[in-house]
Image: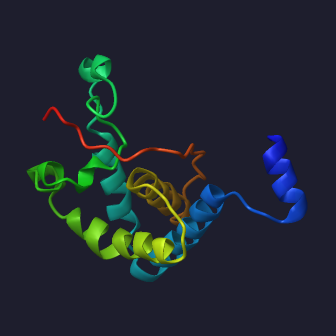
Amino acid sequence: MSCFECFCGIFGAEDPKQKALKAAKAKCVELILSKSCGPILIRTAWHDSGTYDMANKSKGFPNSGGAIGSIRTPHEIDAPPNAGLKKALDTYLTPIKNDLEKDGLVISWADLIQLASATAVEVMGGPKIPMKYGRVDGTPTEL
């Protein structure tokens, strides 16, 4: 724990990134319970992260792919293997992202997609998946 985190904890201030993640998770839990949409959220995260290519590792971010939120690009979302995933982005996750932004909270698409997936696994009875957040959205320039 950093001095800043300790100071904020003592005086009740919360790190804005942590606040955004907690709010996003709460909204994802509510969404998954009300819409039974856990499987499509998991599939969306899988397909977003599945773009990682070890052969492109030397090209660096964002051209090595991975869980960078690039599933939102027409090149990826319109690809046949991703059929049906637009619903996860447009119908389920965009309202969450918009609500957070209205409240002044910021979360990257990359983090929101992975958070929704991990939350879905947990809500549906699976294990709590330890996650690291702080992903930056990216769009590969070399397609």
Q: Is residue 102 above or below residue 89?
A: below
Q: Answer with left or right where residue 85 lies relative to residue 68.
A: left
Is 73 in front, or is 49?
73
- At x 64%, y 60%, the residue is 16
Q: Answer with left or right where residue 74 lies relative to residue 109.
A: left
Question: Which quadrant holds the N terminus?
Answer: top right
**Residue 53 falls in image quadrant:** top left
- At x 46%, y 77%, the residue is 99
> Furthest-bottom residue in view?
34
Q: Is residue 78 above or below residue 135?
A: below
The x and y percentages for residue 125 are: 55, 62
Is 130 in front, or is 7?
7
Is 19 in front, or is 78?
19
- At x 57%, y 48%, the residue is 129
Question: Which quadrant holds the C terminus?
Answer: top left
Q: Is residue 28 above or below residue 85?
A: below
The x and y percentages for residue 64 are: 29, 29
> Furthest-right residue in view?
10
The x and y percentages for residue 140 are: 23, 38
Q: Answer with left or right where residue 102 lies relative to residue 127.
A: left
**Residue 10 falls in image quadrant:** bottom right
The x and y percentages for residue 26 are: 58, 71
- At x 60%, y 53%, the residue is 128
Q: Is residue 47 above or below residue 92?
A: above
